[in-house]
Every structure is written in C-alpha cells, then in structure tokens.
Image (spheres, rainbow, N blue to C red):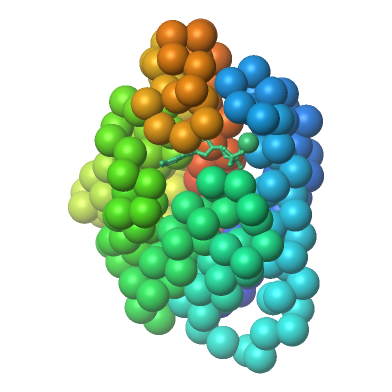
C-alpha cells in the first residue's frame, strides 16, 4: 500500500472526525494549563480543511496536505494553527507520489522540522514536539526494517501516545503553558495530545 491522494484525504477526514469526538477533552486539557481553546481551534481548522478539500481539483497526496496546511494557517488563530499548518504544508511538499513507508517517514520528519523551525521548541519543553519526535523515530525505524505503511503508522501512533502521556511531569517551556511555570507540571499537554490523535488517525486510516 502506498500513500496516495485517497489516503491523504481519508486521513484529513479522520482527523476532523477525531477532533470532533475529542474536542471536549482537548479543551479540558487546555483549560488546565492554557486558555481552553485547543479543541475549538482544531475543530474550526479541520472543518475548514474539509470544506477546502471539497473544492479541490483532483490532485496528488502532496497537494491535499499542502491545502490542509494553508487552510489551518488561515483559519486558526491560536499557536497550534500556524504550527500544524506549517507541518502539513511541509509534509505535503516532501511527499512524492506514490509514497511508500520510507518516503512517508521522511515527509513526517519534514513536518516535525517545520514545527521546530517555527516554534523553536526542544523535546522536553511540553509541546507538540514531545509527541511528534518519538512518532517520527518509530515510523523511521519501522520503515527501515521493512514494515508496511499500516505497521509503521501503528508504531508511530503508539510512540506519539506515549510521548503525549510523558508530558505530564514536564514543566512547559514554550507557549502559553510556560507562563504557569511549575504549575504546568502534572497536566498532559493539549498539543502533544492532539498530535497523538493525528498519528492515531494515520494508523487507523492506513489499516
Ligand atoms: P494557544 O496556546 O494560542 O491558545 P492552542 O491552545 O490551540 O493555542 O495550542 C496550544 C498547544 O500548542 C500547546 O499545548 C502546545 O503543545 C503547542 N505549542 C505552543 N507553543 C508551541 C511551540 N513553540 N512549539 C510547539 N508547540 C507549541
Ligand atoms: Mg489555547
């Protein structure tokens, strides 16, 4: 199985559905250490992304993801809009057609690079980076050892989930949560949690 435009579109639709479902949880997490808008930010963004895809001429998987990124940047005011927007644009730009597991791993790594270039967060800063970094590492390792796309995506989803859970004891050093200092400790980061969701839907979509 290759990553083609049908899969790219199915992935974005699955993210939108998952964000709808998990909106309350994301908002609760962001209420604890932020301003309580992460769920609604992502819902607004991915709902707009779906509408944008409906109007898109048939195009390759890269174009689907690039369009998604551009839409997120223009529709989401919070920190996560530009970060995820740049990430999806970078994934789209890096994705050849058709893309096998190794190419998808490298495209997801380009997405992480884009998040880091914009947000300047290091692993351990309690951000999106803490879920995305282990997910890329797991995806790469799986792809390098001959895993199929669903297998690599499942490994990445597990790693992202663990990465998100591992943000609980961390003190935030980037974004709104960093204003809380030590009071950010003991809560799971909303952005790392939504990144885990994004990788989880990639796994379920490729399966
Ligand atoms: P805002 O903080 O503007 O309200 P959101 O609530 O939508 O935006 O997103 C908050 C999430 O954004 C945080 O939980 C964190 O994971 C992520 N984030 C914030 N700043 C950065 C950064 N510099 N790099 C990576 N991720 C970040
Ligand atoms: Mg917020």
Residue 135: quadrant of the picture:
top left
Q: Provide residue 27's location: percent of width, then percent of height.
A: 72, 31
Question: Residue 170, can we see it?
Answer: yes
Nearest the viewer among 47 and 108 is 47
Left/right placement of residue 11 relative to residue 162 reads right
The residue drawn where x is 75% and y is 54% is 44
Point 39% across, 67% down: residue: 90
Q: Residue furthest bottom?
A: 57
Q: Name the residue nearer the viewer: 138 or 39.
A: 39
Q: Is residue 146 left or right of 90 when viewed as pictured? A: left
The location of residue 186, given as percent across then percent down, is 51, 9
Instruction: Give the image location of residue 49, x and y in percent.
Output: 68, 66
Question: How far from the left and from the top, in percent, is residue 169?
Answer: 42, 11
Left or right: 72 as drawn, with respect to 54: left
Residue at (44, 9) in percent of width and height = 182
Residue 148 higher or lower than 157, as above or below:
below
Q: Is residue 85 above or below residue 61?
A: above
């Amino acid at each position: 199985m290759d990553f083609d435009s049908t899969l790219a579109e199915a992935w974005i639709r699955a993210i939108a559905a998952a964000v709808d479902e998990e909106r309350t949880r994301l908002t609760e997490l962001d209420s604890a250490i932020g301003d309580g808008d992460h769920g609604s930010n992502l819902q607004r963004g991915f709902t707009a992304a779906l509408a944008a895809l409906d109007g898109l001429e048939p195009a390759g998987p890269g174009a689907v993801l690039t369009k998604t990124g551009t839409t997120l940047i223009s529709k989401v005011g919070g920190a996560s809009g530009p970060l995820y927007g740049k990430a999806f644009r970078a994934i789209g730009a890096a994705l050849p057609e058709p893309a096998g597991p190794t190419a998808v791993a490298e495209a997801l790594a380009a997405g992480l690079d884009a998040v880091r270039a914009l947000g300047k967060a290091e692993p351990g800063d309690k951000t999106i980076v803490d879920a995305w970094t282990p997910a890329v590492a797991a995806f790469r390792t799986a792809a390098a050892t001959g895993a199929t796309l669903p297998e690599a995506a499942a490994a990445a989803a597990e790693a992202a989930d663990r990465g998100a859970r591992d943000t609980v004891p961390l003190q935030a050093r980037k974004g709104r949560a960093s204003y809380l200092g030590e009071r950010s400790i003991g809560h799971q980061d909303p952005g790392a949690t939504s990144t885990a969701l994004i990788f989880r839907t990639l796994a379920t979509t490729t399966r």
